[in-house]
Amino acid sequence: MMGKVIFQIVGGFTLGFAAILFGGGVFTIMRYPPRVPRDLLPLTAVVVALIVAGIGLLYLRKWAALLVSLMGLYVATWQVQGALHPVSGYANWLGFLFAALLAIPAVLTAVYWRMLVWTSKHVAPAS
């Protein structure tokens, strides 16, 4: 029961983060228009992936938990790399803290894996 609530909260945060990225992207595009439409693809791909994963987490899907976990671990590797190669005058140790926070969805996915499902449990009757 606790795992269900945790993943639904993470799904809500994921949707909120996607909305913030989308809003920030819209305002950035209005201020600094892209040279070619292809420049919009990376942000659009991340926002769409976050929206799909957030909705999937609300329905407790394994694929959504894996997607959020992998996206978080990908960014966590950047943080660890920055913390391991410090620059004078910066608080590079914060990279370890951010990496630990970004690894939380992966840990939750591993702990509550059996509670999650790949697809809907309802099977349509054959006609």
Image: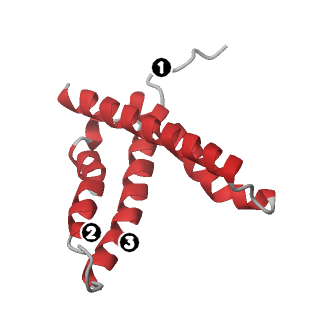
- Residue type of the residue flagged with mark 2: Gly
- Residue type of the residue flagged with mark 1: His
Label 1: which residue? 122
- The kind of secondary structure element at disc 3 is helix
Q: Can residue 104 be seen in this view?
A: yes
Q: Is residue 118 visible?
A: no
Label 3: which residue? 78
Q: How far apart are marks 3 and 2 (CA)?
A: 8 Å
Q: Which of marks 2 and 1 is in front?
A: 2
Chain-order first, disc 1 or disc 3: 3
- Residue type of the residue flagged with mark 3: Trp
Label 2: which residue? 95
Which residue does the image show at 46% across and 35% down from the upper left?
15
Left or right of 77 in this view: 22: right
Q: Please state the horizontal and vertical placement of residue 77, each as a whole percent of the image.
A: 35, 70
Left or right of 23 in this view: 97: left
In which quadrant is the N terminus drawn? Answer: top left
Quadrant hosting residue 113: top left
Which residue does the image show at 52% across and 46% down from the upper left?
21
Crowding at dot 3, Cα within 10 Å, few <14 / some 14-19 / many 20+, comes out as some
Does the CB distance between marks 2 and 1 fall below 8 Å?
no
